[in-house]
Image: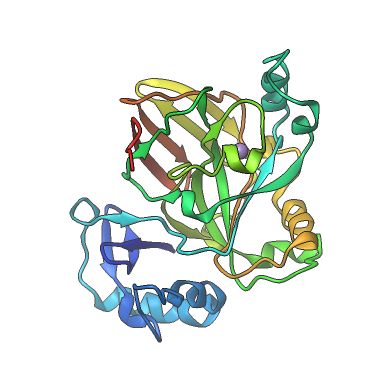
């Protein structure tokens, strides 16, 4: 099932190039500050999934082109991201050489991105006025279902509600990684959430990213050094994973600079395409 949020955070069921409003399947919907309907959906998907499907059958499809898609994660308690999780990406970062990358940054680990850096499909990424290159990192991202702590690797996949695409936008240079990756707009996510049953093997997906007409990244998720169950187990030994939390699984090689006027297109087979226009600083 492909689930999206659209317009004023309506819940949508995506089929082909159409979407059906299935908000009525939710026990509660409030798109304002109390937007925890999404967290509840992530937590209770097992029981709500069939209701959503029934609502989809009754509803009237409208073209996706006629709605505004939103990020398919809403107010996650955290965005966890894997670092240095593809060998060839570690190599390209090592090659940046003197003054570029501290050696500890080349070891696998997880770090946090501010949830306020999330933007949705088609939303403009405004690059802040800062010194240093701002790079794209296109990544397979996991949305957590029920959540938990100290999750054993063998049970980790039961905690995956589904998958989406994230671009882990990064300011290169010295200084704290979480700060360099948490500027407003630095976490585009979308276009929707594909439930885990539709992706039997998340380690057999092709991740591609175009900047304008140039193919920058083209990699197989099977090349991840630390696979999804191990990332979930590792992260959940540190912090309780809550329903709706996002885990970005790390960038494949081919990262590179983005500039105002660019257009990013990230795609993953079986998920979809995430398009993000890039512009200059938005100002205050
Ligand atoms: Mn990354």
Q: Is residue 32 left or right of residue 248?
A: left
Q: Is residue 15 left or right of residue 255?
A: left
Quarter containing the C terminus: top left
Residue 19 falls in image quadrant: bottom left
The image shows residue 61 at horizontal and vertical percentages of 22, 65
Quarter containing the N terminus: bottom left
Look at the picture and state if 152 lies above or below 121. below
Q: Quadrant of ligand 1?
A: top right
> Which residue of the protein is positioned furthest toward the bottom in this rendering?
27
**Count the marks: how many?**
0
The image shows residue 227 at horizontal and vertical percentages of 73, 47
Q: Nearer the viewer, residue 191 or 186?
A: 186
Q: Nearer the viewer, residue 239 or 176?
A: 176
Residue 92 falls in image quadrant: top right
What colour scheme does the image use? rainbow
The image shows residue 73 at horizontal and vertical percentages of 47, 60
The image shows residue 160 at horizontal and vertical percentages of 62, 63
Residue 15 falls in image quadrant: bottom left
Q: Nearer the viewer, residue 218 or 246?
A: 246
Residue in the picture at 40% in, 25% down: 211
Residue in the picture at 58% in, 37% down: 180
């Amino acid at each position: 099932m492909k689930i999206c949020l659209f317009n004023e955070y309506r819940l949508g069921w995506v089929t082909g190039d159409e979407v059906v409003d299935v908000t009525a399947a939710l026990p509660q919907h409030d798109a304002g500050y109390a937007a925890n309907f999404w967290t509840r959906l992530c937590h209770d998907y097992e029981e709500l999934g069939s209701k959503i499907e029934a609502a989809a059958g009754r509803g009237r499809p409208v073209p996706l082109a006629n709605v505004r898609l939103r990020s398919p994660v809403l107010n996650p308690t955290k965005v966890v991201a894997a670092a240095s999780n593809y060998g060839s990406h570690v190599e390209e970062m090592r090659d940046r050489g003197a003054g570029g990358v501290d050696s500890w940054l080349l070891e696998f680990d997880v770090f946090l991105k501010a949830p306020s850096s999330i933007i949705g499909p088609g939303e403009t990424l405004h690059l802040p006025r800062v010194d240093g290159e701002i790079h794209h990192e296109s990544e397979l991202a996991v949305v957590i279902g029920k959540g938990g702590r100290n999750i054993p690797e063998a049970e980790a996949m039961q905690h995956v509600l589904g998958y989406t695409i994230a671009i882990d936008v990064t300011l290169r240079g010295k200084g704290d990684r979480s700060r360099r990756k948490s500027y407003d707009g630095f976490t585009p996510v979308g276009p929707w959430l594909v439930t885990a049953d539709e992706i039997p093997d998340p380690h057999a997906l092709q991740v591609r990213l175009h900047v304008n007409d140039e193919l920058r990244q083209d990699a197989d998720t099977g090349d991840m050094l630390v696979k999804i169950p191990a990332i979930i187990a590792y992260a959940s030994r540190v912090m309780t994973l809550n329903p709706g939390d996002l885990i970005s699984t790390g960038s494949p090689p081919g990262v590179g600079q983005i500039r105002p006027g660019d257009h990013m297109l990230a795609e993953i087979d079986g998920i979809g395409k995430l398009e993000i226009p890039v512009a200059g600083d938005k100002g205050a």
